[in-house]
């Protein structure tokens, strides 16, 4: 697998490119911004952007979606069926997303947004704003915060401890660190 993290200028959100090393088909996770460094990474590695996965429909994860769609014409996936004012393919818990020989699995983790989804690839999960290093995504009510924490416990903290967690903002972490030290869970 080919993998790279990008810190965007849009609210300091993270974006990630993961690609199949055999087919050179690439996935972009979240599209708050798309800058020259991302396009150069694709070109330098001979990658074709064929898929975009949106963890949740907030501007800092979707603002560049229209431009990306015009330039690369990728399939776009989200938990709600729309993102950034565009129709997307709806993905729910347990659905699989194939990018060449890579297979991702969708994890439903609502709370920060009603249709929040994470994507698990081998050895890693893209959590969007559901889970951060040392925190969780904001929720308007305590019942939604509990729903979010329950989804994290059930679908993320049950993964192997060394699973990397790539968040929507801030640094990456691991299941071991967050399940043992995240103040929202200890």
Image (cartoon, rainbow, N blue to C red):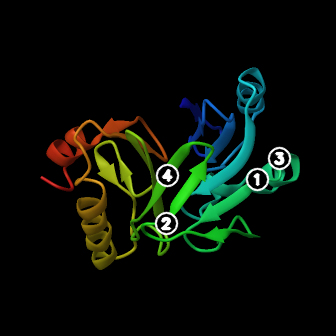
> How far, Cα to Cα, is label 3 from label 2?
24 Å
Pinpoint residue 41: horizontal percent, then vertical percent. Answer: 70, 26
User: Could you say which quadrant of the image residue 16 lies in?
Assistant: top right
- Circle 4 residue: 104
Describe the element under mark 3 as helix, strand or loop: helix
User: Could you say which quadrant of the image residue 178 lies in?
Assistant: top left
| Disc 3 + disc 2, Cβ < 8 Å | no
Relative placement, left or right, of 27 versus 169 is right
User: Could you say which quadrant of the image residue 109 lies in?
Assistant: bottom left
- Circle 1 residue: 74
Pinpoint residue 19: horizontal percent, then vertical percent. Answer: 61, 36
Instruction: Answer above or below: position of 164 versus 62.
Output: above
Viewer-side residue, 8 vs 176: 176
- Circle 2 residue: 95
> How far, Cα to Cα, is label 1 from label 4?
16 Å
Pinpoint residue 181: horizontal percent, then vertical percent. Answer: 17, 43
> How far, Cα to Cα, is label 4 from label 2?
8 Å
Mark 4 and mark 3 lie on one chain; the one further toward the N terminus is 3
| Disc 1 + disc 3, Cβ < 8 Å | yes
Mark 3 and mark 2 lie on one chain; the one further toward the N terminus is 3
- Circle 3 residue: 72
């Amino acid at each position: 697998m080919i993998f790279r993290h990008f810190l965007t200028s849009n609210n300091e959100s993270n974006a990630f490119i993961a690609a199949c090393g055999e087919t050179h088909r690439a996935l972009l996770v979240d599209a708050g911004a798309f800058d020259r460094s991302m396009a150069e990474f694709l070109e330098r590695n001979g990658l074709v952007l064929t898929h975009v996965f949106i963890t949740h429909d907030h501007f800092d994860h979707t603002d560049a979606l229209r431009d990306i769609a015009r330039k690369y014409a990728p399939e776009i996936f989200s938990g709600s069926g729309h993102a950034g004012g565009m129709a997307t393919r709806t993905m729910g818990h347990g659905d699989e997303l194939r990018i060449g020989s890579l297979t991702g699995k969708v994890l439903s983790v609502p709370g920060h947004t009603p249709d929040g989804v994470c994507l698990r690839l081998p050895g890693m999960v893209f959590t969007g704003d559901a889970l951060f290093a040392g925190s969780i995504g904001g929720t308007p009510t305590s019942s939604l915060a509990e729903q979010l924490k329950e989804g994290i416990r059930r679908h993320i903290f049950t993964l192997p401890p060394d699973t990397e967690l790539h968040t929507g903002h801030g640094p990456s972490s691991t299941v071991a660190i967050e399940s043992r030290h995240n103040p929202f869970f200890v």
